[in-house]
Amino acid sequence: MDVLIEKLNGERKKFSDLSLIVRDFLVGTAGVRQYKSEITGRPGNIDKGADYGPRTITVPFMFKAVDLMDYPLLRDEIYAWLGGIEEFWIYEGRSLGLMNFEAPGEKQGRFTGFESDIIYGKRYLVRRTSNLAPDQRGLWGLDTIEFETVGLPFGETTATTLTPFIIGNGTGEVENNIWTVGQAELFGEEPQYVFANPTTIQVYNGGTERVDPAEGMYLLIEYRGASKDLTLFNDTNWTEWSFSGSTVEGNLLEIDGIDSRLNGLSIVRNTNLELITLEPGWNTIQVTGATNGTLSFDFRWYFR
């Protein structure tokens, strides 16, 4: 297995690039934040519901330096990438492959990677919460780093629904790995997320969580073409978005999270000020007002 970290500026580094051997990738469940009140003279408490709290991810690892002079250099390189205070994306990578080392012989020299491809199916936005202080044993160093999720506590697919249903043939380690998680393998037929002249359509959410832009989840719905008073109604959860206006051929209408735009200009005040959300599984969506155009849904799957 391996772990890939991606800074918010897009810069990436794998643990194996730092000569780190990942011993495990421990993902805890999201915490529970309870709301309750108490009344004097009444036993127990009054339940007022709960929310998800942050999630903890723990990664025990080890590394081997080439020699004793190399050890502090390698340690400081690890600190440069993992010792900061900024948040970044962390990707869980799994593989059946064997480990490779730089020098010939039985586990000599720095670790250089795996013999087969690593599949990165999920990612989490995290920040380091533990200190690094490797236990040096000769040329080897052993340590554990702990992360806590920032913002949403859910894991999410590394790509979006407009990525083709292909596993592991992208141009990099992360691309085209969306379908390695969730229920994708259960499909007899590939779900569609682009619809020409839509009326009644089926949109599949393979995660365990409702996709809700109001909670900061990624959802981009685009309509290209002619329409009049376009309305999207999700029969599955009764959420609806509507636009009081018209578009013509060549126009681009975007529902981007909580924002709505027509050809790049905001049209929020001309909508019903509501949002479409997508339940786990299949969502039946009624489309009215689309006279000649194409509708697309681009989003991630989220997992508790």
Image (tube, helix red, strand yellow):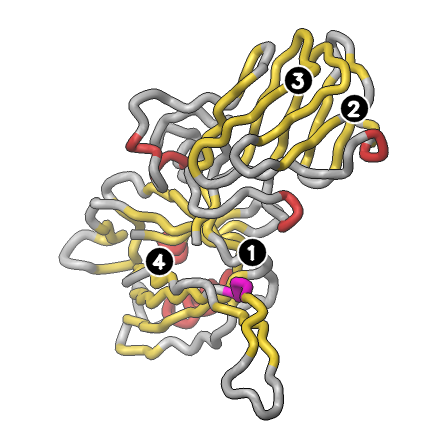
Q: Residues within 10 Å of mark 3 (few under 14, many from 20)?
A: some
Mark before the other along the chain sequence, 1 or 3: 1
Q: Amino acid at mark 2?
A: Leu
Tell me if residue 79 can be seen: no
Q: Nearer the viewer, residue 299 or 175?
A: 299
Res 297 quadrant in image? top right
Name the residue: 37% across, 65% down.
59
Magenta-drawn stretch, dominant element (helix, strand or loop): strand
Res 107 quadrant in image? bottom left
Q: Nearer the viewer, mark 4 or mark 2?
A: 2
Q: Which residues are magenta?
A: 50-54
Q: Which residue is mark 3?
A: 288
Q: Residues within 10 Å of mark 2 (few under 14, many from 20)?
A: some
- Left or right position of 260 against 175: right
Query: Quick one: SS at disc 1?
Result: loop
Name the residue: 47% across, 68% down.
31
Quadrant of the drawing holding the C terminus:
bottom left
Mark before the other along the chain sequence, 3 or 2: 2
What whole-number distance in Å separates the C-alpha atoms at marks 1 and 3? Answer: 33 Å
Mark before the other along the chain sequence, 1 or 4: 4
Instruction: Give the number of the disc on residue 170.
Output: none
Q: Residues within 10 Å of mark 4 (few under 14, many from 20)?
A: many
Query: Quick one: SS at disc 2?
Result: strand
Q: Which residue is mark 2?
A: 262
Q: Which residue is mark 4?
A: 19
Instruction: Give the number of the disc on residue 152.
Output: 1
Mark before the other along the chain sequence, 4 or 2: 4
Name the residue: 43% across, 46% down.
208
What whole-number distance in Å separates the C-alpha atoms at marks 4 and 2? Answer: 49 Å
Cβ atoms under marks 4 and 2 closer than 8 Å? no
Q: Is residue 53 magenta?
A: yes
